[in-house]
Amino acid sequence: MRVDVISIFPEYFAPLDVSLIGKARERGILDIHLHQLRDWARDVHRTVDDTPYGGGPGMVMKPEPWGEAIDAVLAADPAAQPRIIVPTPSGVPFTQKLAMEYAAEPWLLFTPARYEGIDSRVMAEYGARMRVDEVGIGDYVLAGGEVAVLVMVEAVGRLLPGVLGNAHSAVDDSFAPGAMENLLEGPVYTKPPEWRGHEVPEILLSGHHGKIARWRRDEALRRTARNRLELLAALDPETLDKHDRKLLSELGFPA
Ligand code: SAM
């Protein structure tokens, strides 16, 4: 997968050299290109922001440098088109489902902003020609979109074939479509069996795969009920078996 990022802080992306994503880059699974937005600013101060029309506090990112920078990235492969991802708290929520959708794309272009964001005409211009998604990573406001891009590239990158050591580990993750859709993963344990008086749940030492799977699902349902009621409400009733329904009703949520 090719990933382009245009930012006034390309140095923010040093973590993409580390760990799983760093290895995926070394192995050619992820081909990441970082671009300095100011290279497309035309004045001596390399200005990329200006005062907002309509007044108000803060500055807005000018459309011209963004347009020229995006055009230059698009010119890298005129036969293809990237999916453009504009991080913004006012976008659609970034979810595991969206991460999986992005993982199936051959080319992503991220446009992290600073100040009050990018002049909206940039999104209108490219949105008329290709897929442009405005995406938020959570209900809070960051100082800039770089961290949001790091979050999304890591979530997408670990889903690419060959990146995770064990391809099955993503299947059991919280939110994974299938059995874990709208569920949080329960607690996990490793050796030793007892640590500071805390014991590993006995069932996990039993070697009984069926019972362990059932225990894990119960714990996932319990944790979701405790931490994320809105996910529990979104569970597809069709995916619930008799035991799930009994447990949910014991927890006070009749399915
Ligand atoms: N005034 C904007 C608003 O209230 O929607 C917030 C601008 S924020 C200070 C500057 C930039 O940080 C945004 O344009 C975006 O690129 C990034 N950003 C901040 N919070 C984000 C979030 N939750 N998800 C994705 N990007 C975010």
Image (tube, rainbow, N blue to C red):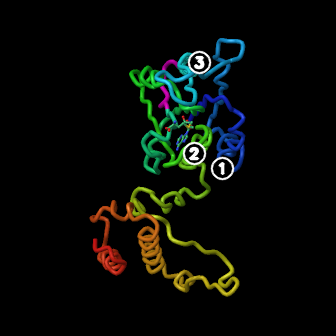
Which mark lies nearer to you, 2 or 3? 3
Report helix, strand or loop for mark 1: helix
Q: Which amino acid does label 3 sit on?
A: Pro
Q: Can residue 111 be seen in this view?
A: no
Q: In which quarter of the image is the N terminus?
A: top right
- How would you rate the neighbour count of disc 1 (Cα within 10 Å): few for under 14, some for 14-19, many for 20 or more? some
Q: Which of marks 1 and 3 precedes in the sequence?
A: 1
- Name, please, the residue furthest toward the top: 43
Q: Distance between the residues labelled 2 and 3?
A: 28 Å
User: Where is ligand 1, by quadrant?
Assistant: top right
Q: Which of marks 1 and 2 precedes in the sequence?
A: 1
Position of 41 relative to 57 (above/below): above
**Prevailing secondary structure of the magenta residues:** loop
Q: Which of marks 3 and 2 precedes in the sequence?
A: 3
Magenta span of residues? 78-84
Task: Please tell me which residue lies in front, 45 or 53.
Answer: 53
Q: What residue sits 42% from the left and 23% below the top? A: 124
Q: Which amino acid does label 1 sit on?
A: Leu
Determine if the C-beta at disc 1 is less than 8 A from ligand 1. Answer: no
- Verify CB contact (< 8 Å) between mark 2 and mark 1: yes
Q: Position of residue 106 (x, y in %)?
A: 51, 34
Task: Please tell me which residue lies in front, 18 or 197.
Answer: 197
Q: Position of residue 161 (x, y in %)?
A: 55, 47
Q: Which label is found at residue 157? A: 2
Q: How far apart are marks 2 and 1 (CA)?
A: 8 Å
Q: Which label is found at residue 65? A: 3
Q: Is residue 44 visible?
A: yes
